């Protein structure tokens, strides 16, 4: 059972608990997929500029765990544990996030979908939180770090993507 | 819940976002707001109560008309917050794109 299936509550429809980002990436789908498949690849790009990661375990198969510490630009460390739920090369990866220890504390599920568009790849990055409250908590913890304040104009994008 | 959480929860509903979009064009009455939604007056009022509690709108005192007005400051605050949040994953994808460019140059 996926995380989302366990946690749907009528009061909070999935769209309200999600953040969706879509991008057309200038690389073939197989290569984009490959960038997710090893700790060495992921160390090159996971997290915004200023963040780095140190991986202690990486098992890229359904049920496998990726355990890593994310180092923030301010020196703060964040324990991360991603569990892979679905791996379908080169189209789909679904994983869910738990805290650093082995206690199951599901927070959000990440669904990555890759579609070929000629030589390019349409990537859809969907993060579904267990609740709006959890989304807000994570936003406080991680979002505040980045500090990249945007203009009010982006509300339009955000609202349109969920509407 | 603090007021930002109230605001974000209020924004999570498509009908309420449509109401805000209408109010962005100017103040209007509950009756006018209800028209495009195939919804009863009380149902719309329920949404308006959520929006008012979240500080996203203000309603006039005129008991007959109760005109609704958008409170732009609170909306702006929520927009900035959400943008910061998205920024985290957007930032990762920026780096992924750069990395893929490097990989392709090597080939």
Image (cartoon, coloured by chain):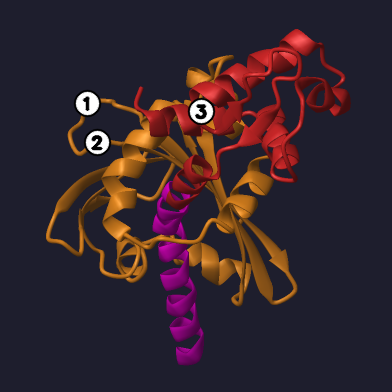
Chain colours: A orange, B red
Image height of A37 relative to A107, above or below: below
Q: In which quarter of the image is residue B61?
A: top right
Question: Do the residues at pointers 1 and 2 share their chain?
Answer: yes
Label 3: element kind: helix
Read off the residue under disc 3.
B9
Question: Do the residues at pointers 2 and 3 share their chain?
Answer: no
Q: The numbered mark 2 sits on a residue in which chain? A: A
The residue range painted magenta reads B81-107
The answer to the question of whether label 1 and label 2 lie on touching residues, with beta carbons closer than 8 A, is yes
Callout in the foreground (1, 2): 2
Indicate the position of residue A81 as horizontal and vertical percent values.
28, 42
Question: Mark 2, residues whose alpha carbon is within 10 Å: few (<14), some, or many (≥20)?
Answer: some
Indicate which disc residue A99 carries: 2
Q: The numbered mark 1 sits on a residue in which chain? A: A
Q: Which residue shows up at 37% across the image and 68% down it? A: A45
Indicate which disc residue A103 carries: 1
Measure how far apart labels 1 and 3 are at the Cα level. 29 Å
Residue A61 visible in the shown view: yes
């Amino acid at each position: 059972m996926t995380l989302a299936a366990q946690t749907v509550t009528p009061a909070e429809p999935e769209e309200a608990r999600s953040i969706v980002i879509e991008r057309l990436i200038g690389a073939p789908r197989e290569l984009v997929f490959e960038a997710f498949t090893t700790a060495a690849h992921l160390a090159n790009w996971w997290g915004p500029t200023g963040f780095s990661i140190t991986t202690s375990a990486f098992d890229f198969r359904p049920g496998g765990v990726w355990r890593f510490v994310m180092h923030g630009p301010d020196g703060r460390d964040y324990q991360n544990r991603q569990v892979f739920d679905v791996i379908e090369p080169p189209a789909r990866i679904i994983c869910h996030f738990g805290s650093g220890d082995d206690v199951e504390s599901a927070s959000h599920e990440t669904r990555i979908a890759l579609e070929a568009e000629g030589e390019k790849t349409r990537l859809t990055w969907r993060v579904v939180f267990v609740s709006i409250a959890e989304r807000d908590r994570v936003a406080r913890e991680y979002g505040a770090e980045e500090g990249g304040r945007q203009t009010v104009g982006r509300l339009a994008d955000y609202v349109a993507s969920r509407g | 819940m603090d007021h930002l959480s109230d605001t974000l929860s209020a924004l999570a509903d498509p009908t309420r976002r449509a109401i805000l979009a209408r109010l962005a064009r100017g103040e209007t009455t509950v009756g006018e707001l209800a028209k495009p939604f195939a919804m009863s007056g009380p149902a719309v009022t329920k949404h308006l109560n959520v929006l008012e509690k979240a500080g996203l709108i203000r309603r006039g005192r005129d008991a007959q008309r109760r005109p609704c007005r958008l409170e732009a400051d609170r909306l702006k605050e929520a927009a900035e917050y959400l943008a910061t949040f998205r920024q985290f994953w957007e930032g990762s994808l920026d780096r992924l794109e750069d990395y893929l460019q490097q990989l392709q140059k090597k080939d």
